[in-house]
Image (cartoon, rainbow, N blue to C red):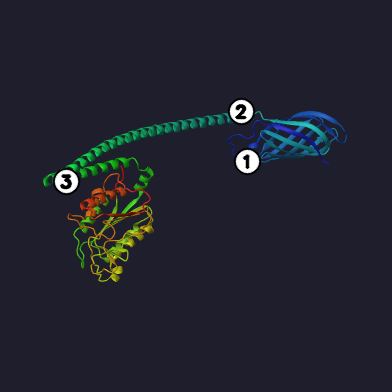
Amino acid sequence: MRQTLAILAATVSAIATAGCQGPPSDKFDGEYEMVMSCGYFTERTSGHRENFGFNTVSSVRDGKLGLSVERPGFDWRGGGSIDADGNIRIAGTRRQKTLDRSVAFETEGRFRSGRADLIVVVDTISESNCNLHVAKASLDAAVSAVARQEMEKNRADIAAAERSLEAERQRVTAALARATAERELAARDIAAASAERERMTRELATASDERQRISEATLNAKNQTEVEEARRQRAALAVKIAELENRLSAASAARAIDPAVLATMRSERRLALVVGNGNYERIPKLRNPINDARAVSGALRRLGFEVVAVENADYRTMIRAIAEFGNRLSRNSVGLFYYAGHAVQVRGSNYLVPVDADMRSEAEVDYAAVNAGSVLAKFEAARGRVNIALLDACRDNPLPAMTRSATRGLAVVGQSPTGTLIAYATGPNRLAADGDGANGLFTEALLRHIETDDLKIEDLFKRVTDDVERRSNGRQVPWLTSSLKGDFYFKLPR
C-alpha cells in the first residue's frame, strides 16, 4: 500500500522567457538547482524517524525531467516529464545504501504562478514533512531583461496613449470652437433678419395707410381724371404691398427651414414631364400652350429638374411619354407633370386631349383622350415624397356637341396619392383664359413666382391665385388640392 511521502513546494522566479521558439514544453527547459529540506519522515517497517536535507542539480530538456539525489545512507534516482501546462510526473527508486534495499516512488505535481507543488509517494514511508525549493541563478538576469522589456513596452504604450488623448482633446476643442463660432454667426443672422422684418413691417404699415388715403381720395374725387389717377396709384401700391409681403414672407421662412428637410430636398432627384398641345387637327387650335410648355420647361431646368418636353403630342405619344415618366419615378424622386392644352370632364373624370383626337360621342373619349388619372397612378406606384400635377387646361369647350355627361371645365380629383399636390388653372367646372400675351394667365403667374427664393409651394400658389384673380377681375380663380406631408421649395434656400 502506497503512502504519501511529502508535499514539495517549489518557488521559481521565472519559468518561461521571452523569445522562446521551441514547442510549448520548451519553456521549462534548463538546469535547476534543487534544495530539498525535509522536517522528518518515518519508515513504516522499522519505525525509524529521520530528519534530512540535500542539494542536487536536476534538468529539463524537451519536456523531459530528470532527478538525481545522493546523500549518506541513500540516494534517489528518477525521470519523468513536464508538459506545456506545467504538469509534472516523475517515477523512480529510493535506495538505502546500508541495507542495499530499494523502494519505488512516484511524483505528480504542477507549476502554478511561479510555484511547483509535488506529491511524492514511496511504498515504505508512512509520514513525512518535506519542502523542495527550486531555483536557477541564471534565470535572474533573464527575468530582469524580460521585466525591462515589458516596462519599456508599457512606457511606449502609455506615451502613445497620451499622444492620442492629446490629439483627441485638441480635435474636440477645435470642434467646440467651430460650433461656438457658428452659433454666434447664426445668432447675428437671426438678429439681422428680425431687424429686416421689423423694417418691412413698418413699410407695410405705411403702405397700408397710403392705400387707405388713396381709397378715400378716390371716393372724394370730383372728376373722372382724378378717379383714374387714384386707381392707377392704387394698383401700383398694391404691387408694392405684394412685393413687401413676399419679401417679408421670405425673410421669415429663411430661418424656419428644418435642416433635415433641406438635406432631403437636396438629395432628391427632380423629374418633370411637360406636355403642350396647341395644333389640334379636328377641334379649335390654341395659341399659347406651346409657349407655355417651353417657358415652364426652361424654368424647371433652371430649378434642377430633369425635363422631358413633348409638344403637339398625339394619343400614342402621350401614352408612351406618361409610361416612360412613371418608370423613371422612385421613392427618392420628386415627380412633376405639367399639361397645357384642351381637356374635358366626362362622368366625373378628367381627360387630356391629344392633337389627333377625333371624338364625336362620349363613348369615344375613353380611347381617344388620355385619362389624367393615369398620371396620378404613376405617382402612387412610385411612392415619392412629393408629386406635383399642374393642369393649365379648360381654356374653352372643345366638344360642344357632347353635353349629356360632358361637363364644362375639369373635375377636382376626390382622392389623390399621399404627398400629391394638384393645381388647376381655374376652379371646378369653370373655364381658363388663354391669355392676351405669350402665355396663359395661370402659366404667366406661375412663371412670375416659381423661381422666388425660399418660397414654399403652398405660398407660391397663393401668390399665383392672387395674380390670376386680379388679372381676370375675379373671373378665373386657380384651384389647389394637396395631400403633401412635408415641405417643398422649387428654389432651394441658399
Q: Position of residue 39 (x, y in %)?
A: 79, 29
Q: Is residue 303 visible?
A: no
The span from disc 3 to disc 1 (Cα, nearest Å) is 106 Å
- Horizontal placement of 287 versus 372: left or right? left
Residue of label 3: 231
Cβ atoms at labels 1 and 2 below 8 Å apart: no
Q: Which residue shows up at 43% across the image and 33% down it?
A: 172
Q: Earlier in the sequence, mark 2 or mark 3?
A: 2
Front residue of 476/139: it is: 476
Q: Position of residue 155 (x, y in %)?
A: 53, 29
Q: In the picture, residue 132 is in which quadrant?
A: top right
Cβ atoms at labels 2 and 3 below 8 Å apart: no
Element at badge 2? helix
The span from disc 1 to disc 2 (Cα, nearest Å) is 22 Å
Outermost residue on the right side: it is 46
Can you say which quadrant of the picture contains the N terminus?
top right
Residue of label 1: 24
Q: Earlier in the sequence, mark 3 or mark 1?
A: 1
* Label ID, residue 141: 2
Residue type, label 1? Pro
